[in-house]
Image (tube, rainbow, N blue to C red):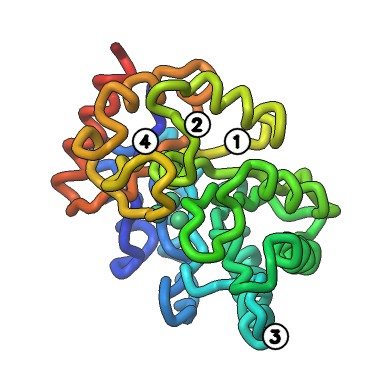
């Protein structure tokens, strides 16, 4: 069975997200660990957390894919911004242990003119400060579209970051289909070729989750505008190949398409259908 869900709001608590996921046919989901823009985190209610853990177990959920706020930039040129990213990630990793064994995804960051090498170095430094030997969470670098000075639009950059992390057993990658396509990887016409490239540069064993989004823009546009599944430049056939691919089909798939809950329920149904061929 395909493991699929979408991004959900934490506003009604953790247990509510579990029930909401189940109500739309999902068996995983994504959520922001804290306010995606401001960076504040609410205290975790232990009863609410317990209720979600029980729901996940009772319903056989796949690993959840938590998302760090967009505002974190571990490779900013401003020391206070780097320090904020470090503190927020360290705190998120403590909070993630409330739900052991899940995934925590973040955007590597933007080097803002310092150059990609400096960016890679600063991101790895941050990871070397926040990772702990006995954490149960795997931290994922998201593949980026390469807009502005984003680091992580090339597999080589992600591999270089992971290669500099001491506790790299706790590191993985989340492949965003819109982002890799916009970055110039042709997953529509050459999915196997792209996955071979990923394998030779990063290693497919690092691939832990898929953000499943269509794109509003052409291959290599470096734009990052998500579209609903089948309504963008990737198209439904590409997603059929993606969800059926033997190297991908057992991973958690997370939708981040422009949708409300009803639309997500429909996309989940569509992708489950495509997965079964
Ligand atoms: Fe993301
Ligand atoms: Fe994404
Ligand atoms: Zn995106």
**Crowd band around label 4 with a 10 angstrom C-alpha radius: few (<14), some (14–19), many (20+):** many
Report the mark closest to the observer, 2 or 3. Answer: 3
Report the mark closest to the observer, 3 or 1. Answer: 3
**Distance Cα–Cα, label 1 vs label 4:** 16 Å
Tell me the element at label 3. Answer: helix
Question: Horizontally, is 274 left or right of 148 in the view?
Answer: left
**Distance Cα–Cα, label 2 vs label 1:** 8 Å
Task: Determine the residue positioned at 31% across, 69% down.
Answer: 11
On the image, numbered disc 3 is attached to which residue? Answer: 79
- Of residues 220 and 5, the one drawn nearer to the viewer in this rendering: 220
Q: Marks 2 and 1: CB-CB under 8 Å?
A: yes
Q: Residue furthest bottom?
A: 80
**Distance Cα–Cα, label 4 vs label 2:** 9 Å
Question: Horizontally, is 125 left or right of 85 in the view?
Answer: right
Q: Residue furthest top?
A: 277
Tell me the element at label 4. Answer: strand
On the image, numbered disc 4 is attached to which residue? Answer: 4
Mark nearer the N terminus (3 vs 1):
3
Mark nearer the N terminus (2 vs 1):
1
Mark nearer the N terminus (4 vs 2):
4
Report the mark closest to the observer, 1 or 4. Answer: 1
Residue 127: percent from left, percent from top:
74, 62
**Distance Cα–Cα, label 4 vs label 3:** 38 Å
**Distance Cα–Cα, label 3 vs label 1:** 31 Å
The circle on residue 251 is 2
Q: Is residue 202 visible?
A: yes
On the image, numbered disc 1 is attached to which residue? Answer: 207
Report the mark closest to the observer, 2 or 1. Answer: 1
Mark nearer the N terminus (1 vs 4):
4
């Amino acid at each position: 069975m395909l493991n699929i869900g979408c991004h959900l709001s934490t506003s009604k608590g953790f247990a509510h997200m579990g029930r909401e996921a189940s109500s739309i046919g999902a068996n995983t989901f994504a959520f922001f660990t804290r306010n995606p823009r401001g960076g504040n985190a609410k205290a975790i209610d232990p009863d609410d957390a317990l209720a979600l853990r029980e729901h996940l177990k009772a319903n056989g959920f796949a690993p959840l894919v938590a998302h760090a706020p967009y505002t974190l930039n571990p490779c900013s040129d401003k020391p206070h911004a780097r320090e904020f990213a470090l503190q927020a990630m360290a705190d998120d990793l403590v909070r993630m242990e409330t739900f052991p064994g899940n995934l925590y995804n973040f955007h590597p960051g933007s080097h803002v003119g310092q150059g990609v090498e400096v960016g890679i170095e600063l991101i790895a430094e941050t990871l070397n400060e926040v990772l702990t030997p006995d954490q149960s969470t795997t931290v994922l670098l998201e593949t980026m579209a390469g807009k502005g000075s984003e680091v992580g639009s090339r597999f080589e950059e992600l591999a270089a970051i992971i290669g500099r992390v001491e506790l790299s057993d706790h590191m993985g990658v989340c492949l965003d289909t819109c982002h890799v396509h916009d970055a110039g990887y042709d997953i529509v016409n050459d999915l196997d070729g792209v996955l071979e490239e990923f394998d030779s540069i990063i290693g497919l064993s690092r691939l832990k989750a898929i953000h499943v989004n269509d794109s509003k823009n052409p291959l290599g546009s470096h734009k990052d505008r998500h579209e609903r599944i089948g309504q963008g430049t990737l198209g439904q056939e590409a997603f059929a190949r993606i969800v059926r691919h033997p190297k991908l089909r057992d991973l958690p798939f997370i939708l981040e398409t422009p949708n409300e809950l009803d639309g997500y329920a429909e996309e989940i149904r569509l992708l489950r259908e495509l997965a079964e061929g």
